[in-house]
Amino acid sequence: MTGAEREVLPATPGTYALVLESRARARVQVGRWGELYLQPGYYVYVGSAFGPGGIRARVGRHLRGARSKRWHIDYLRAQLEPHAAWFSTAERRLEHDWARAISGMDSLTPVARFGCSDCQCHTHLFHAATAPDLHTLSARVVSPMTRLAIDDAQICFMPRLELPRPDAVLMRRMLAEVPWAQQEIVVYGRTRPQPRLTAWFGDPGAEYQYSGLRLHPHPWSSLLLELKARVEHQVGVSFNSVLLNYYRNERDSVGLHSDDEPELGPEPVIASLSLGATRTLTLQHKRRKSIRSVQLPLTSGSLLLMQGQTQRNWRHGINKSRQACGPRVNLTFRQIQAPGVR
């Protein structure tokens, strides 16, 4: 970066993310932190610039390379080449939020305890085998999902996902275009109709079984593919199927359950997009009675992400409501695994 290019950076405080390219394996002594074995690929580092000169001084230093070694990243910069950088000039320090948001991406591997000696973060440095998708990265750090403080679970929530059309338009199209059906399910040995309407879409072969049902996917519609792309862009995970639930009114519901079927893998990743009337999701721990149930209102346009050990440890459901409420459509995006990888 030339001096003129560095002048484009604002001399105001802020938070930044730096992407560096590693072209070969190398061993680097990082001050008193210890040795770091660099792997080929890319490293993403998150930091803050609240000292003199702000973003221009700190990011400019990293991009040009510094002779003195003051921070952990200075030792890496001597071995790595700049690939990309972005920043925020928000007055609040965001590096901890950004680090937590990036740590939820499957494509990046955290480098434990790097660059976070003065905070409670697990790390501020991440490795990717291939160049990170900058659009996905920026979406995660600029509008990150908030991880909820729930024991034995990895659940993130975003009150509002940017959607391609107004919620009301999406609802009308969903209700008109989706082949809704009321399935018969087996609950405690008894067959009964589901208290809601459902539809299953996905890639060819993405079959799903639960409660005595075997679902064969409808082919993706252009609208569902558009919504899937928005969700994948936000959470950094790819999905090959979606279960749609239509709650017609306050009498429709879904009982407490876990999405732990074998075809979802040992640690299912499920992204739930809500449209329409607000309904409250109840979460209940399977074993630890001392942990209180969680009540989470799911507003229109909100996005909920459940992953890790969530399905192993928790049940979730939506109860019938005593108050009248309008229709709600819920899209739960999933990844059905092939039989050979389960």
Image: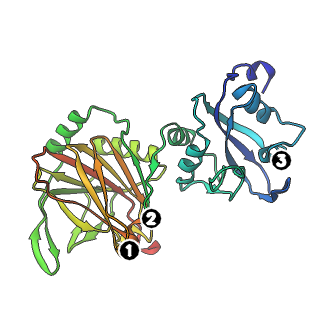
Residue highlighted by disc 2: 151
The disc labelled 3 sits on which kind of residue? Answer: Tyr
| 308 vs 331: above or below | below
Residue found 68% across the figure and 57% down from its top? 111
Residue found 53% across the figure and 53% down from its top? 105
Q: Give coordinates of residue 150: x percent, y percent.
A: 42, 60
Q: Quadrant of the C terminus?
A: bottom left
Q: Give coordinates of residue 318: x percent, y percent.
A: 22, 58
Q: Quadrant of the N terminus?
A: top right
Say if residue 220 shows up in the picture.
no
Among all residues in the image, which is located at the extreme right?
Answer: 67
Q: Secondary structure at mark 1?
A: loop
* Residue 86 relative to residue 266: left or right: right
Q: Give coordinates of residue 260: x percent, y percent.
A: 35, 71
> In whole angstroms, how far apart are the C-alphas of marks 3 and 2?
37 Å
Which of the 4 image quarters holds residue 169? top left
| 309 vs 143: above or below | below
The residue lying toward the viewer, choosing from 77 and 122, is: 122
Crowdedness near tag 1: few (<14), some (14–19) or many (≥20) residues, C-alpha within 10 Å = few
Which of the 4 image quarters holds residue 282? bottom left
* Residue 239 relative to residue 321: left or right: right
Residue highlighted by disc 1: 288
Q: Secondary structure at mark 3?
A: helix
> In whole angstroms, how far apart are the C-alphas of marks 1 and 2?
10 Å
> In whole angstroms, how far apart are the C-alphas of marks 1 and 3?
45 Å
* Residue 239 relative to residue 188: left or right: right
Q: Earlier in the sequence, mark 1 or mark 2?
A: 2
Q: Give coordinates of residue 179: x percent, y percent.
A: 15, 51
Crowdedness near tag 3: few (<14), some (14–19) or many (≥20) residues, C-alpha within 10 Å = many
- Using the image, tell me which numbered label, if any, was put on residue 75: 3
Q: Earlier in the sequence, mark 1 or mark 3?
A: 3
* Residue 58 relative to residue 226: left or right: right
